[in-house]
Image: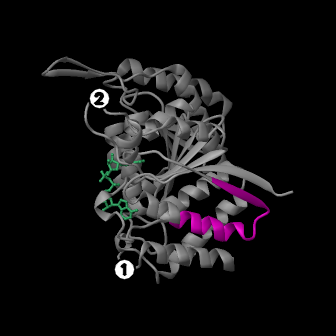
Amino acid sequence: MAKIYNVAILKGDGIGPEVTNSTIKVLNALLEKTDFKIKYEYGEAGFYCIEKYGTNLPEQTISLLRRTDACLKGPMTTPQTPGAPVSAAVQIRKMFDLFANVRPCRSFPNVEALKPNIDLIVVRENTEGMYSGIEYELSPEVGIALRIITRKASLKVVEYAFKLASKRKKHLTIVHKGNILRITAKIFKDAVKSLEPKYPEVKVDEAHIDAMAMQLIKKPESFDVIVTTNLFGDVISDEAAQVTGSLGLAAGANIGYNYGMFEPVHGSAPKYTGKNIVNPIATIMAAALMLDYLGEMKAAIKIENAVINVLNEGKVRTKDLGGSSTTSEISEEISKKIRSL
Ligand code: NAD
Protein backbone atom coordinates (compact mmCIF):
# COMPACT_ATOMS: atom_id res chain seq x y z
CA MET A 1 0.00 0.00 0.00
CA ALA A 2 1.25 3.48 -0.85
CA LYS A 3 2.69 5.46 2.02
CA ILE A 4 0.52 8.43 3.00
CA TYR A 5 1.95 11.58 4.60
CA ASN A 6 -0.40 13.84 6.55
CA VAL A 7 0.59 17.41 5.84
CA ALA A 8 -0.88 20.46 7.55
CA ILE A 9 -1.45 23.38 5.18
CA LEU A 10 -1.65 26.87 6.69
CA LYS A 11 -2.27 29.33 3.88
CA GLY A 12 -1.64 32.45 5.97
CA ASP A 13 -2.30 36.09 5.11
CA GLY A 14 -1.88 38.44 2.16
CA ILE A 15 -0.31 36.59 -0.79
CA GLY A 16 -0.19 33.39 1.33
CA PRO A 17 -3.28 31.71 -0.18
CA GLU A 18 -2.07 32.43 -3.76
CA VAL A 19 1.42 31.01 -3.30
CA THR A 20 0.15 28.05 -1.26
CA ASN A 21 -2.56 27.11 -3.78
CA SER A 22 0.04 27.30 -6.57
CA THR A 23 2.31 24.98 -4.60
CA ILE A 24 -0.49 22.45 -4.07
CA LYS A 25 -1.07 22.39 -7.83
CA VAL A 26 2.61 21.56 -8.31
CA LEU A 27 2.50 18.88 -5.59
CA ASN A 28 -0.58 17.35 -7.20
CA ALA A 29 1.25 17.13 -10.54
CA LEU A 30 4.13 15.40 -8.77
CA LEU A 31 1.81 12.98 -6.93
CA GLU A 32 0.42 11.67 -10.24
CA LYS A 33 3.54 9.51 -10.53
CA THR A 34 4.87 8.93 -7.00
CA ASP A 35 4.59 5.78 -4.94
CA PHE A 36 3.49 7.84 -1.94
CA LYS A 37 0.49 10.09 -1.31
CA ILE A 38 -0.06 13.28 0.63
CA LYS A 39 -3.21 13.97 2.60
CA TYR A 40 -3.60 17.73 2.94
CA GLU A 41 -5.18 18.90 6.18
CA TYR A 42 -6.07 22.59 6.09
CA GLY A 43 -5.79 24.77 9.17
CA GLU A 44 -6.29 28.39 10.09
CA ALA A 45 -3.47 30.59 11.39
CA GLY A 46 -2.33 34.15 10.88
CA PHE A 47 -3.33 37.74 11.43
CA TYR A 48 -6.84 37.23 10.03
CA CYS A 49 -7.58 34.75 12.85
CA ILE A 50 -7.11 37.32 15.61
CA GLU A 51 -10.51 38.93 15.10
CA LYS A 52 -12.23 35.56 14.81
CA TYR A 53 -10.47 33.57 17.55
CA GLY A 54 -8.56 36.17 19.59
CA THR A 55 -5.32 34.48 18.59
CA ASN A 56 -3.26 33.96 15.42
CA LEU A 57 -2.75 30.28 16.29
CA PRO A 58 -6.08 28.71 17.34
CA GLU A 59 -6.14 25.58 19.51
CA GLN A 60 -7.63 23.44 16.72
CA THR A 61 -4.67 24.37 14.50
CA ILE A 62 -2.21 23.32 17.21
CA SER A 63 -4.01 19.94 17.44
CA LEU A 64 -3.84 19.67 13.66
CA LEU A 65 -0.09 20.25 13.72
CA ARG A 66 0.29 17.64 16.47
CA ARG A 67 -1.38 14.92 14.40
CA THR A 68 0.43 15.61 11.10
CA ASP A 69 3.89 14.67 9.81
CA ALA A 70 4.88 18.14 8.64
CA CYS A 71 3.46 21.58 7.92
CA LEU A 72 3.58 23.71 4.79
CA LYS A 73 3.03 27.28 5.91
CA GLY A 74 2.24 30.33 3.84
CA PRO A 75 3.50 33.76 4.92
CA MET A 76 1.62 35.51 7.72
CA THR A 77 1.25 39.14 8.70
CA THR A 78 2.89 39.71 12.08
CA PRO A 79 0.99 41.77 14.66
CA GLN A 80 3.18 44.74 15.61
CA THR A 81 1.47 46.31 18.60
CA PRO A 82 2.84 45.59 22.11
CA GLY A 83 0.67 42.97 23.84
CA ALA A 84 -0.57 41.46 20.54
CA PRO A 85 0.05 37.73 19.96
CA VAL A 86 3.62 36.96 18.89
CA SER A 87 4.19 35.70 15.36
CA ALA A 88 2.47 32.35 14.71
CA ALA A 89 5.71 31.02 13.17
CA VAL A 90 7.66 31.90 16.32
CA GLN A 91 5.01 30.16 18.48
CA ILE A 92 5.09 27.00 16.33
CA ARG A 93 8.91 26.94 16.34
CA LYS A 94 8.98 27.06 20.14
CA MET A 95 6.03 24.74 20.73
CA PHE A 96 7.48 21.98 18.53
CA ASP A 97 11.12 22.74 19.38
CA LEU A 98 11.96 23.35 15.73
CA PHE A 99 15.47 24.34 16.71
CA ALA A 100 17.06 24.66 13.26
CA ASN A 101 15.96 27.20 10.69
CA VAL A 102 17.54 26.13 7.44
CA ARG A 103 17.67 28.47 4.46
CA PRO A 104 19.41 27.32 1.29
CA CYS A 105 20.59 30.19 -0.94
CA ARG A 106 21.91 29.42 -4.38
CA SER A 107 22.26 30.97 -7.80
CA PHE A 108 19.52 30.09 -10.28
CA PRO A 109 19.75 30.23 -14.07
CA ASN A 110 18.58 33.49 -15.63
CA VAL A 111 18.18 35.13 -12.24
CA GLU A 112 20.29 38.19 -11.73
CA ALA A 113 22.54 37.58 -8.71
CA LEU A 114 25.54 39.43 -7.28
CA LYS A 115 27.80 36.51 -8.23
CA PRO A 116 27.36 33.20 -10.06
CA ASN A 117 28.01 29.82 -8.39
CA ILE A 118 26.57 30.61 -4.99
CA ASP A 119 25.46 27.55 -3.07
CA LEU A 120 25.28 28.11 0.67
CA ILE A 121 22.93 27.28 3.52
CA VAL A 122 22.29 29.47 6.55
CA VAL A 123 21.38 27.46 9.65
CA ARG A 124 19.89 29.70 12.30
CA GLU A 125 19.10 28.82 15.91
CA ASN A 126 15.35 29.09 15.99
CA THR A 127 14.07 28.98 19.55
CA GLU A 128 15.94 31.48 21.74
CA GLY A 129 18.47 34.34 21.42
CA MET A 130 16.95 37.77 20.81
CA TYR A 131 13.68 36.08 19.82
CA SER A 132 13.04 34.56 23.22
CA GLY A 133 10.21 37.12 23.39
CA ILE A 134 11.26 38.48 26.78
CA GLU A 135 11.16 42.26 26.79
CA TYR A 136 10.58 44.73 29.60
CA GLU A 137 9.72 48.37 29.70
CA LEU A 138 11.66 49.67 32.68
CA SER A 139 10.24 53.13 32.21
CA PRO A 140 8.48 54.80 29.28
CA GLU A 141 11.94 55.72 27.97
CA VAL A 142 13.94 52.60 28.76
CA GLY A 143 13.33 49.07 27.51
CA ILE A 144 15.34 45.85 27.60
CA ALA A 145 15.14 42.67 25.52
CA LEU A 146 16.82 39.48 26.69
CA ARG A 147 19.19 37.52 24.45
CA ILE A 148 19.06 34.03 25.94
CA ILE A 149 21.68 31.57 24.73
CA THR A 150 21.81 28.08 26.25
CA ARG A 151 24.33 25.32 25.68
CA LYS A 152 21.48 22.84 25.16
CA ALA A 153 19.87 24.73 22.24
CA SER A 154 23.27 25.69 20.79
CA LEU A 155 24.41 22.05 20.71
CA LYS A 156 21.25 20.95 18.86
CA VAL A 157 21.54 23.51 16.09
CA VAL A 158 25.31 23.23 15.77
CA GLU A 159 25.11 19.44 15.50
CA TYR A 160 22.51 19.83 12.74
CA ALA A 161 24.86 22.23 10.91
CA PHE A 162 27.86 19.89 11.25
CA LYS A 163 25.85 16.98 9.82
CA LEU A 164 24.69 19.14 6.91
CA ALA A 165 28.22 20.41 6.17
CA SER A 166 29.61 16.88 6.26
CA LYS A 167 27.12 15.88 3.54
CA ARG A 168 28.01 18.94 1.41
CA LYS A 169 31.25 20.88 0.84
CA LYS A 170 32.49 20.14 4.38
CA HIS A 171 32.94 23.75 5.37
CA LEU A 172 31.20 25.28 8.39
CA THR A 173 31.35 28.98 9.29
CA ILE A 174 30.21 30.09 12.75
CA VAL A 175 28.90 33.63 12.91
CA HIS A 176 28.78 35.51 16.23
CA LYS A 177 29.65 38.77 17.95
CA GLY A 178 32.07 37.40 20.52
CA ASN A 179 34.00 40.65 20.86
CA ILE A 180 30.94 42.40 22.34
CA LEU A 181 28.48 39.76 23.55
CA ARG A 182 31.22 37.82 25.32
CA ILE A 183 29.24 35.52 27.61
CA THR A 184 26.44 34.50 25.26
CA ALA A 185 28.70 34.16 22.19
CA LYS A 186 31.13 32.02 24.19
CA ILE A 187 28.39 29.54 25.06
CA PHE A 188 27.55 29.22 21.35
CA LYS A 189 31.21 28.95 20.32
CA ASP A 190 31.92 26.38 23.05
CA ALA A 191 29.12 24.22 21.65
CA VAL A 192 30.91 24.27 18.29
CA LYS A 193 34.25 23.45 19.90
CA SER A 194 32.83 20.48 21.76
CA LEU A 195 31.32 18.98 18.59
CA GLU A 196 34.27 19.67 16.28
CA PRO A 197 36.17 16.43 17.13
CA LYS A 198 33.11 14.40 16.06
CA TYR A 199 33.29 15.83 12.53
CA PRO A 200 37.02 15.93 11.66
CA GLU A 201 36.19 16.08 7.93
CA VAL A 202 34.48 19.49 8.34
CA LYS A 203 36.68 22.59 8.13
CA VAL A 204 35.44 25.15 10.69
CA ASP A 205 36.04 28.89 10.57
CA GLU A 206 34.34 31.86 12.19
CA ALA A 207 33.34 35.44 11.47
CA HIS A 208 31.81 38.33 13.36
CA ILE A 209 28.30 39.18 12.21
CA ASP A 210 29.30 42.61 10.85
CA ALA A 211 32.19 41.14 8.84
CA MET A 212 29.87 38.38 7.61
CA ALA A 213 27.34 40.91 6.33
CA MET A 214 30.18 42.28 4.17
CA GLN A 215 31.63 38.92 3.11
CA LEU A 216 28.23 37.76 1.89
CA ILE A 217 28.32 40.60 -0.64
CA LYS A 218 32.04 40.30 -1.43
CA LYS A 219 32.51 36.54 -1.79
CA PRO A 220 29.26 34.62 -1.21
CA GLU A 221 30.55 31.76 -3.37
CA SER A 222 33.17 30.90 -0.72
CA PHE A 223 30.65 29.69 1.89
CA ASP A 224 29.01 26.32 2.40
CA VAL A 225 27.11 26.04 5.70
CA ILE A 226 26.86 29.05 8.02
CA VAL A 227 25.55 28.54 11.56
CA THR A 228 24.53 31.34 13.87
CA THR A 229 22.19 32.56 16.60
CA ASN A 230 18.60 33.64 15.99
CA LEU A 231 18.67 37.36 15.16
CA PHE A 232 21.97 37.26 13.24
CA GLY A 233 20.62 34.32 11.24
CA ASP A 234 17.38 36.12 10.46
CA VAL A 235 19.28 39.08 9.01
CA ILE A 236 21.97 37.25 7.05
CA SER A 237 19.60 34.68 5.60
CA ASP A 238 17.51 37.48 4.05
CA GLU A 239 20.72 39.11 2.84
CA ALA A 240 21.94 35.83 1.33
CA ALA A 241 18.54 35.34 -0.35
CA GLN A 242 18.79 38.74 -1.98
CA VAL A 243 22.43 38.16 -3.02
CA THR A 244 21.27 35.16 -5.01
CA GLY A 245 18.39 37.01 -6.66
CA SER A 246 14.81 37.48 -5.59
CA LEU A 247 13.20 37.01 -2.19
CA GLY A 248 10.50 35.30 -4.27
CA LEU A 249 12.77 32.25 -4.70
CA ALA A 250 14.01 31.63 -1.16
CA ALA A 251 12.55 28.88 1.02
CA GLY A 252 13.14 27.95 4.64
CA ALA A 253 12.80 24.83 6.73
CA ASN A 254 12.15 24.76 10.48
CA ILE A 255 13.35 21.42 11.73
CA GLY A 256 13.14 19.65 15.08
CA TYR A 257 13.59 16.04 16.17
CA ASN A 258 9.86 15.26 15.73
CA TYR A 259 8.35 17.80 13.35
CA GLY A 260 9.16 20.11 10.46
CA MET A 261 7.53 23.30 9.20
CA PHE A 262 8.33 24.63 5.75
CA GLU A 263 7.70 28.15 4.46
CA PRO A 264 8.80 30.81 2.01
CA VAL A 265 11.32 33.28 3.43
CA HIS A 266 9.29 36.25 2.25
CA GLY A 267 6.37 37.78 4.11
CA SER A 268 2.71 38.31 3.26
CA ALA A 269 3.42 41.26 0.89
CA PRO A 270 -0.07 42.72 1.55
CA LYS A 271 0.03 45.22 -1.31
CA TYR A 272 0.14 42.37 -3.85
CA THR A 273 -2.73 40.36 -2.32
CA GLY A 274 -5.05 38.78 -4.89
CA LYS A 275 -3.23 40.28 -7.87
CA ASN A 276 -1.88 36.95 -9.11
CA ILE A 277 1.52 38.52 -9.86
CA VAL A 278 3.86 37.32 -7.12
CA ASN A 279 6.38 34.54 -7.46
CA PRO A 280 5.20 31.20 -5.99
CA ILE A 281 8.64 29.55 -6.40
CA ALA A 282 9.76 30.21 -2.78
CA THR A 283 6.76 28.23 -1.49
CA ILE A 284 7.23 25.55 -4.16
CA MET A 285 10.87 25.19 -3.05
CA ALA A 286 9.62 25.02 0.58
CA ALA A 287 7.51 22.03 -0.47
CA ALA A 288 10.66 20.44 -1.96
CA LEU A 289 12.44 20.93 1.40
CA MET A 290 9.44 19.30 3.08
CA LEU A 291 9.63 16.25 0.80
CA ASP A 292 13.35 15.95 1.53
CA TYR A 293 12.58 16.08 5.30
CA LEU A 294 9.91 13.36 4.84
CA GLY A 295 12.57 11.18 3.22
CA GLU A 296 11.28 11.59 -0.35
CA MET A 297 14.55 12.90 -1.82
CA LYS A 298 13.81 11.87 -5.41
CA ALA A 299 10.52 13.75 -5.37
CA ALA A 300 12.21 16.82 -3.85
CA ILE A 301 14.86 16.79 -6.60
CA LYS A 302 12.15 16.46 -9.25
CA ILE A 303 10.52 19.68 -8.04
CA GLU A 304 13.87 21.48 -7.90
CA ASN A 305 14.78 20.32 -11.40
CA ALA A 306 11.43 21.44 -12.77
CA VAL A 307 11.91 24.89 -11.21
CA ILE A 308 15.47 25.14 -12.58
CA ASN A 309 14.28 24.07 -16.06
CA VAL A 310 11.54 26.71 -16.08
CA LEU A 311 13.97 29.42 -14.93
CA ASN A 312 16.56 28.23 -17.44
CA GLU A 313 14.11 28.50 -20.34
CA GLY A 314 13.20 31.98 -19.11
CA LYS A 315 9.88 32.06 -21.02
CA VAL A 316 7.61 32.20 -17.99
CA ARG A 317 8.83 34.67 -15.38
CA THR A 318 7.10 36.79 -12.74
CA LYS A 319 7.64 40.52 -12.36
CA ASP A 320 10.29 40.19 -9.62
CA LEU A 321 12.41 38.28 -12.17
CA GLY A 322 11.87 40.83 -14.92
CA GLY A 323 8.94 39.07 -16.63
CA SER A 324 5.19 39.59 -16.79
CA SER A 325 3.80 36.09 -16.14
CA THR A 326 1.23 35.48 -13.45
CA THR A 327 1.53 33.37 -10.30
CA SER A 328 -0.72 30.72 -11.85
CA GLU A 329 1.21 30.64 -15.13
CA ILE A 330 4.44 29.85 -13.25
CA SER A 331 2.87 27.01 -11.27
CA GLU A 332 1.25 25.60 -14.43
CA GLU A 333 4.60 25.66 -16.25
CA ILE A 334 6.40 23.97 -13.33
CA SER A 335 3.62 21.35 -13.14
CA LYS A 336 3.97 20.71 -16.89
CA LYS A 337 7.73 20.22 -16.49
CA ILE A 338 7.17 17.80 -13.60
CA ARG A 339 4.81 15.73 -15.75
CA SER A 340 7.44 15.60 -18.52
CA LEU A 341 10.45 14.71 -16.30
P1 NAD B 1 7.47 40.94 2.49
O1 NAD B 1 8.45 39.84 2.27
O2 NAD B 1 6.08 40.56 2.69
O3 NAD B 1 7.51 41.92 1.24
C1 NAD B 1 8.62 42.76 0.93
C2 NAD B 1 8.69 42.93 -0.58
O4 NAD B 1 9.32 41.76 -1.13
C3 NAD B 1 7.36 43.02 -1.28
O5 NAD B 1 6.84 44.32 -1.31
C4 NAD B 1 7.71 42.53 -2.66
O6 NAD B 1 8.31 43.56 -3.39
C5 NAD B 1 8.74 41.45 -2.39
N1 NAD B 1 8.18 40.12 -2.33
C6 NAD B 1 7.85 39.40 -1.23
N2 NAD B 1 7.38 38.20 -1.58
C7 NAD B 1 7.40 38.15 -2.92
C8 NAD B 1 7.05 37.15 -3.89
N3 NAD B 1 6.55 35.95 -3.54
N4 NAD B 1 7.19 37.45 -5.20
C9 NAD B 1 7.67 38.62 -5.58
N5 NAD B 1 8.06 39.61 -4.73
C10 NAD B 1 7.93 39.36 -3.42
O7 NAD B 1 8.03 41.80 3.71
P2 NAD B 1 7.32 42.94 4.56
O8 NAD B 1 6.55 43.84 3.66
O9 NAD B 1 8.38 43.47 5.42
O10 NAD B 1 6.32 42.14 5.50
C11 NAD B 1 4.90 42.03 5.31
C12 NAD B 1 4.34 41.22 6.45
O11 NAD B 1 4.85 39.88 6.41
C13 NAD B 1 4.73 41.76 7.83
O12 NAD B 1 3.64 41.65 8.70
C14 NAD B 1 5.86 40.85 8.27
O13 NAD B 1 6.00 40.79 9.66
C15 NAD B 1 5.39 39.55 7.67
N6 NAD B 1 6.46 38.53 7.47
C16 NAD B 1 6.09 37.25 7.66
C17 NAD B 1 7.02 36.25 7.42
C18 NAD B 1 6.58 34.82 7.62
O14 NAD B 1 5.40 34.54 7.77
N7 NAD B 1 7.51 33.86 7.61
C19 NAD B 1 8.29 36.55 6.96
C20 NAD B 1 8.62 37.90 6.73
C21 NAD B 1 7.68 38.88 6.99
Residue 324 numbered mark, or none: 1
Point out the stretch of residues depicted in magenta.
Answer: 22-40
**Amino acid type at image mark 2:** Gly
Q: At numbered mark 2, what does the secondary structure look like: helix, strand or loop?
A: loop
Q: Position of residue 246 (x, y in %)?
A: 38, 63
Q: Position of residue 74 (x, y in %)?
A: 47, 53
Residue 75 numbered mark, or none: none
Q: Quick one: which residue is furthest to the top in this view?
A: 138
**Amino acid type at image mark 1:** Ser
- Compute the Cα span from label 1 to label 2: 41 Å
Residue behind label 1 places its C-beta within 8 angstroms of ligand 1 = no
Q: Where on the image, by quarter, is ligand 1?
A: bottom left
Mark 1 or mark 2, earlier in chain: 2
Q: Residue at x 49, y 73 (%)?
A: 109
When the figure is inspected, residue 328 is found, relative to residue 268, above or below; the finding is below
Neighbour tally class for label 2: few under 14, some 14-19, many 20 plus, Cα within 10 Å: few
Nearer the viewer's eye, disc 1 or disc 2? 2
- Quadrant of the image for the N terminus? bottom right
Q: Residue at x 28, y 61 (%)?
A: 271
- Quadrant of residue 3 within the rendered picture: bottom right
Q: Residue at x 48, y 54 (%)?
A: 11
- Total labels: the figure holds 2
Q: Position of residue 151 (x, y in %)?
A: 52, 20
- Quadrant of the image for the C terminus? bottom right
Q: In the rendered image, which residue does mark 2 sit on?
A: 83
